[in-house]
Image (tube, rainbow, N blue to C red):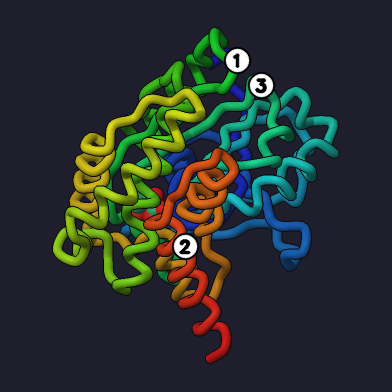
Amino acid sequence: MSNALPWLVIGQGAIGSLMAIRLAEQGLPVQLKLRQEAPAKTSTTLTCGDKSVRLPTTRSVTQACWIFAAVKAYDVAPLLRELHQSPAFRSSTLVLSYNGMLNDEATLLRPHDLHWVTTHGAYRELDRVVHAGHGQSWLGTQQAGLAQPQELCKQLAQALPPLTWDANIATRRWHKLAVNCLINPFTVVHHCRNGELLQQVSAAQWQQVAEEIVALAAVRGIELEAARLIDHARQVASATAANRSSMLQDYRLGRTTEISYLNGFIASASAEAGLTAPANAALAQQVLELSRDRDLR
Ligand code: KPL
């Protein structure tokens, strides 16, 4: 454990909270980072199943640490700007998890920052975290050839297994993007848990959404296959059958959804590339309209 650093967990959504609890259960030092505007408190209690942990909190990065940040795609840029202001961030390692695809925000990332891509499903019920779907996770950097940080990987893998080091994390992110594009908007449109989609969505609907993703990925040099993406989405929907997708959770709680970073991204990036993506554009529009109607109620 010689090169180990303490953990700082950022993002108290379902996945961040789950990881914080699991790391702490391993006996590792874990602090939670509060948002700048959050009321001052020195600790917070998180509960998952019958286990509760009380964790110290902080507002900023004050020492070199391993940062696990699980945040909404639209919070990535403000978070990175804030982290860059802290001198201790320079000697800290960032593990970042978000859904969807970043645009300009990506320029704020350091080449050695680690990307954690997961298919675990979790949701929060008040202060309780429910780990509703056991998935798997991958970790890697966008810069090819960087060595795997052994101890950090070991600790993350023990906390929330299984974890695989993936030298090609960009392709993995496209797979995850596809899974989210095939599951999340449909759970809002049908207002259902992930598992119910297997009856609600027709094969033709999934096929069109997947084919548009494959076409855009190809333009960006990533080779995907529609049939594999659909199989993967089907597996994730059954493995996380009892979960409410993060988009449905956001929708129900009156929060901004990540639709612009998922199907909205596919639609706009396709248009920029001279392609059309009518199925993704229509889904993005539907979710935006449902959210607008929700906000007008
Ligand atoms: O990532 C997810 C999400 O809800 O955003 C899945 C894997 C679909 C689990 O619900």
Above or below for 60 versus 149: below
Percent across and percent down for residue 130 are: 35, 59
Give the percent coordinates (x, y) of residue 157: 39, 28
**Quadrant in the rendering for residue 102:** top right
Q: How many marks?
A: 3
Residue indicated by mark 3? 111
**Mark 3 in CB contact with mark 2 (< 8 angstroms):** no
Q: Amino acid at mark 2?
A: Ala
Direction from residue 56 to residue 21 in the image, left or right = left
Q: Residue at 25% x, 57% y: name it.
A: 205
The CA span between labels 1 and 3 is 21 Å
The residue nearer to you, when weighing 218 against 247, is 218
* Location of mark 1 (residue): 3
The image quarter containing residue 108 is top right
Precedes in sequence: disc 1 or disc 3: 1
Q: Residues within 10 Å of mark 2 (few under 14, many from 20)?
A: many
Q: Nearer the viewer, mark 1 or mark 2?
A: 2
The residue at 75%/51% (across/down) is: 59
Front-most of residues 12 and 25: 12
Give the CA separation, mark 1 to mark 2.
Answer: 45 Å
Residue under numbered circle 2: 284
Dot 1: what SS? loop
Question: Dot 1: within a 10 Å radius of its alpha carbon, few (fewer than 14), some, or many (20 or more) residues?
Answer: few
Tell me which label, 3 or 2, sits earlier in the chain: 3
